[in-house]
Amino acid sequence: MSFPKNRMRRLRSSDAMRRLVRQTNININNLVYPLFAREGKKLKEPIKSLTGCFYFSPDAIAKEAREVFSLGIPAVLLFGLPEKKDAAGSQAWAEDGVIQQAVKEIKSNIPELLVITDICLCEYTDHGHCGVIRDGKVDNDATCELLAKVALSHAQVGADIVAPSDMMDGRVKYIREALEENSFESIAIMSYAAKYASAFYGPFRDAAQSAPAFGDRKTYQMDPANSDQAMAEIALDIEEGADIIIVKPALPYLDVIYRASQRFDCPIAAYNVSGEYMMLNAAADAGLINRQNAMMETLTAIKRAGADILITYFAKDVAKIINS
Ligand code: PBG
């Protein structure tokens, strides 16, 4: 008779036993909910490509942020859709830009809620690339200077964390320097360090009207085939002053999350992106999978791989389940 026999079965024998030995738990404290701000008045408009998500005008966004906060979610990630786009993306750093207004509204109404702002130009440029174009290509250094301006303008209106998602080389350093020079040393940088050139951003680009008008983002976003490069990108961003790093997308890159979590001491966020979200919604709508179970399983897997923070359009749904 060997006693280890049936050990696994004993450990799975009841709901309480399974909870007792569970190694990975999704915690509301680690969730970030993305929000989209769009110019207008009293606007709450469904986003067609992102079921269950809405565009909010700055005057209407605080109500939503309050709901997020009352669910126990500590942070929102803000994206802005400007009315006017130009070649440089100048609305991204405009004093009264849509994001700047939205940040002020949220911070003045719910000061405890962390506001993370996406730092990129693709939603603001008329060509849809993440930087300024020179001779048909994105000019890396000129773009970094603009990104630092954008980050500073967000800090000035009260953003707690800035999240550069552009993937230009050296942008974390430019941003950190601009923040330091202006006495914003308490602003954290959450950098999209390992951001892949992924097909899973499709619904977001539709929602943010940020698809590139020509070419693609393969010269600045990472090749899905590589993970060593992700480690190098992360190391660089940490060295340049990033406090939290992001791996994006999440589900197809669990190995990258795992490697990063083994190797780096800083908090790791995983972005469960728009395509991952809608793929699951579409399958559930077709009656093929159970939405809630698939959602919890997916997010648990991302955490199990090593993510500390989950950025997800499911955040409110998850919080409601945990709270109930
Ligand atoms: C902007 C940005 C993108 C996403 C977040 N920030 C799109 C892109 O890189 O094309 C995608 C988020 C998602 O798909 O949910 N650069």
Image (spheres, rainbow, N blue to C red):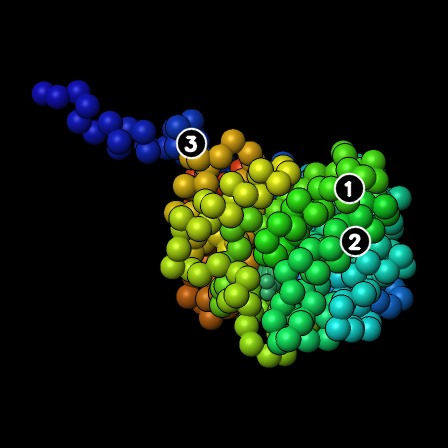
Label 3 vs label 1: CA separation? 39 Å
Figure check: 193 above or below 220: above
Answer with left or right where residue 7 lies relative to residue 76. Answer: left
Q: Which mark is residue 179?
A: 1
> Of the residues tagged 3 and 2, which is closer to the observer?
2
Name which of mark 3 and mark 1 comes first in the sequence.
3
Nearer to me, 68 or 311: 311
Query: What kind of residue is marked 3?
Result: Gln
Secondary structure at numbered mark 3: loop
In the image, what residue occupies the spot 80% across and 48% down? Answer: 152
Q: Is residue 288 visible?
A: yes
Kindly give the residue lying farthest to the front in the view shown. 135
Q: Quadrant of residue 201?
A: bottom right
Tell how many labels: 3
Near mark 2 (Cα within 10 A), the count class, few <14, some 14-19 or many ≥20, is: many
Near mark 1 (Cα within 10 A), the count class, few <14, some 14-19 or many ≥20, is: many
Answer with left or right where residue 180 lies relative to residue 156. Answer: left
Quadrant of the image where one finds ligand 1: bottom right
The image quadrant where one finds the C terminus is: top right
Look at mark 2 in the image and give the residue it sits on.
149
In the image, what residue occupies the spot 55% across and 58% down? Answer: 273
Name which of mark 3 and mark 2 comes first in the sequence.
3
Answer with left or right where residue 322 lies relative to residue 118. Answer: left
Q: Position of residue 63 (x, y in %)?
A: 82, 52
Query: What kind of residue is marked 1?
Result: Leu
Query: What kind of residue is marked 2?
Result: Lys
